């Protein structure tokens, strides 16, 4: 019976009567053969198998086959049960920032809080303000929401996609605050803090994920609706930040599902996963670019003297 070839001729590389040599190292004489392709394999190229040894090419071929049959999550990444490191990290940063607010409130708030009038002078506050909070109840509620929603989404979407959606949602919340702020109003000078923009982005992401996976989505809509009612009825809550995070978080997740490469019968699942990762990275980048363009458009409409200069 003929054996398949995996990169080299499956037959011995020597003529009848000659000593068999390794195809990769012709100067190495060997009588050991690969259990899969039956080619001679020298000590450098031998890879231990359940019975006997494999050559390097067969080992790589088997590894590709195993990766191609690996289960995938909802976004096309490798499905595995892992610790939600991103969720834990965000929660830890929020807790550390809150401790800093209590130990050195003036310094931390001044350097990290977002305010429209200094958006250009302190662009890092589009992100850092999402880790600050206005009080104990504020941070407790946000940490609970992160714990409840974040763990599930991080397992479902994967670490990188989940982190991208969350961070861009945080940025989008502050971009919305800037967009809707009137330079002549008190709100232009006021600071906005909290992880709520990112959390609302996760709420929207949760709705899309559950709907596309055939899971319960009505309860998520009720959750979003209740939080929006609270947003618009309770004083001193930034509806702009909540709405900005919700809109962009939902849109990014929906775009990831819509643009994800579809698997055809016999397709290389590993290559497909790489393509999906590249497409989803582009979606996250497009969301970030949209935020930048909105900031630029808003800045161009602000009267001179209402923005702190960059230099």
Image (spheres, rainbow, N blue to C red):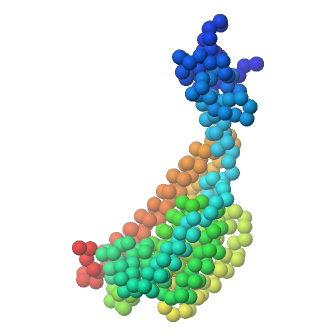
**Residue drawn where x is 55% and y is 74% of the image:** 91
Viewer-closest of 281 and 42: 42
Residue 153 screen position, x and y as percent:
62, 66
**Residue drawn where x is 42% and y is 64% of the image:** 289
Seen in the image, is 170 located left or right of residue 14? Answer: left
In the rendered view, would you say 32 is above or below 85? above
Viewer-closest of 181 and 32: 32
**Residue drawn where x is 69% and y is 51% of the image:** 71
Numbered label tally = 0
**Residue drawn where x is 39% and y is 84% of the image:** 104
Q: Is residue 289 among what the camera can see?
A: yes
Question: Which quadrant of the structure image shows residue 111?
Answer: bottom left
In the rendered view, would you say 227 is above or below 279? below
Viewer-closest of 299 and 158: 158
In the rendered view, would you say 256 is above or below 219? above
Residue 31 screen position, x and y as percent:
66, 18
Seen in the image, is 114 located left or right of residue 10? Answer: left
Q: Which residue is most to the front?
A: 43
Residue 214 screen position, x and y as percent:
72, 64
Can you say which quadrant of the picture contains the C terminus? bottom left
Residue 5 screen position, x and y as percent:
64, 24
Seen in the image, is 81 located left or right of residue 231? Answer: right
Viewer-closest of 208 and 60: 60
Q: Which residue is most to the right?
A: 1
Can you say which quadrant of the picture contains the N terminus? top right
Question: Which quadrant of the structure image shows residue 231?
Answer: bottom right
Q: Is residue 177 among what the camera can see?
A: no
């Amino acid at each position: 019976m003929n054996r398949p070839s995996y990169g080299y001729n499956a037959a011995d590389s020597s003529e009848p009567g000659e000593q068999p040599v390794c195809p990769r190292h012709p100067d190495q004489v060997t009588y050991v053969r690969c259990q899969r392709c039956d080619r001679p394999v020298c000590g450098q190229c031998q890879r231990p198998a359940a019975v006997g040894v494999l050559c390097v090419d067969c080992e790589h071929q088997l590894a590709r086959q195993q990766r191609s049959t690996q289960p995938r999550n909802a976004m096309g990444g490798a499905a595995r049960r892992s610790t939600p490191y991103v969720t834990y990290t965000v929660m830890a940063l929020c807790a550390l920032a809150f401790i800093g607010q209590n130990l050195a409130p003036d310094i931390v708030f001044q350097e990290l809080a977002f305010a429209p009038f200094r958006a250009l002078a302190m662009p890092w506050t589009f992100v850092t303000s999402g880790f600050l909070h206005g009080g104990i109840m504020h941070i407790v509620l946000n940490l609970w929401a992160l714990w409840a929603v974040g763990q599930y989404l991080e397992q479902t979407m994967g670490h990188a996609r989940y982190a991208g959606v969350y961070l861009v949602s945080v940025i989008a919340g502050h971009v919305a605050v800037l967009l809707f702020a009137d330079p002549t109003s008190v709100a232009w000078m006021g600071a906005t803090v909290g992880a709520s923009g990112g959390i609302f982005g996760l709420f929207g992401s949760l709705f899309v994920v559950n709907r596309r996976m055939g899971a319960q989505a009505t309860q998520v809509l009720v959750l979003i609706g209740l939080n929006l009612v609270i947003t618009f009825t309770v004083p001193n809550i930034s509806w702009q930040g909540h709405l900005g995070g919700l809109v962009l978080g939902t849109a990014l997740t929906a775009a990831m599902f819509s643009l994800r490469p579809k698997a055809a019968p016999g397709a290389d699942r590993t290559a497909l996963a790489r393509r999906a990762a590249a497409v989803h990275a582009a979606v996250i980048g497009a969301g970030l670019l949209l935020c930048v363009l909105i900031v630029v458009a808003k800045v161009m409409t602000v009267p001179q003297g209402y923005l702190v200069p960059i230099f």
